[in-house]
């Protein structure tokens, strides 16, 4: 079971311990009993998914930047190719550009492998960018389980539980309150751009 479920903790760079980045990423596949050729393939494939340059593989993981350490640690879990990948606040402490880059890499892994990805996060922008379905926990109990759009349409309930909807959703809620016909269920920048483009092309008619 431990090879079918991969866990990336909140600060995955604390999981690094080997002499080189290559050895760190290879640790899991080796413990799975894979041969050297397959281990090497998985190391390089995982490093490519998280955009770690091959030249970094022979460096000490402790010489990497913060973002590189994060990606190296995540690659170490991805190299085992788990059926379920669980990530606990993977973007914690990253700047906006680093956060978007890492989330895109996680989505690329999901698309490439077909694995189930469980993302634990308080950041609603991260959730909106990645999730197909959202489970909201409140006081240790499940409060909502629904497609992302449906969850974010219940903004008032989320706020009562101490959560917020994405900033772009709040902006569009305010636009609707002012009578601008932008439609509903907008929770990421791509959707926002599509709605505004349709509204502008339609001369102000309802963009939904």
Image (tube, helix red, strand yellow):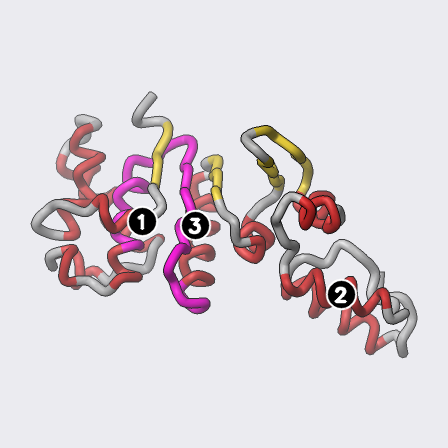
- Viewer-nearest residue: 80 or 10: 10
User: Of discs 2 and 3, which sits in the foreground?
Assistant: 2
Total numbered labels: 3
The residue at the point 11 percent across, 56 percent down is: 60
Q: CA distance from mark 2 to mark 3?
A: 27 Å
Outermost residue, left side: 19
Q: Specify whether 55 is left or right of 144.
A: left
- Viewer-nearest residue: 169 or 186: 169
Q: Earlier in the sequence, mark 3 or mark 1?
A: 1
Q: Specify whether 112 is left or right of 15.
A: right
Q: Earlier in the sequence, mark 1 or mark 2?
A: 1
Kindly state the secondary structure of the residue where label 1 is placed: loop
> Which stretch is magenta?
70-98
Q: Can residue 45 be seen?
A: no
**Up/down of 19 relative to 189, above or below:** above
**Residue on which the image places disc 3:** 106
Residue 139's label in the rendered image is: none
**Residue on which the image places disc 2:** 172
The residue at the point 17 percent across, 29 percent down is: 31
Q: Quadrant of residue 112?
A: top left
Which quarter of the rendered picture does the C terminus lie within? bottom right
**Residue on which the image places disc 1:** 11
User: Of discs 3 and 1, which sits in the foreground?
Assistant: 1
Q: Quadrant of residue 175?
A: bottom right
The residue at the point 34 percent across, 41 percent down is: 8
């Amino acid at each position: 079971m431990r090879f079918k479920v991969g866990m990336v903790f909140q600060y995955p760079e604390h999981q690094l311990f080997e002499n080189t980045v290559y050895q760190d990423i290879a640790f899991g596949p080796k413990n799975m009993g894979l041969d050297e050729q397959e281990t090497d393939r998985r190391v390089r494939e995982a490093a490519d998914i998280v955009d770690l340059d091959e030249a970094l593989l022979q460096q000490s993981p402790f010489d990497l930047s913060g973002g590189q350490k994060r990606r190296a640690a995540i690659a170490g879990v991805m190299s085992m190719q788990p059926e379920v990948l669980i990530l606990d606040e993977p973007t914690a402490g990253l700047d906006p550009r680093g956060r978007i880059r890492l989330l895109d890499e996680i989505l690329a892994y999901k698309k490439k492998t077909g694995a189930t990805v469980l993302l634990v996060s308080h950041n609603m922008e991260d959730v909106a960018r990645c999730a197909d379905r959202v489970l909201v926990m409140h006081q240790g109990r499940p409060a909502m389980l629904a497609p992302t759009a449906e969850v974010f349409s219940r903004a008032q309930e989320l706020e009562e539980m101490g959560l917020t909807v994405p900033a772009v959703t709040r902006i569009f809620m305010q636009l609707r309150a002012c009578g601008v016909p932008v439609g509903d269920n907008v929770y990421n920048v791509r959707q926002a751009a599509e709605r505004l483009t349709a509204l502008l092309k339609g001369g102000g008619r309802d963009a939904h």
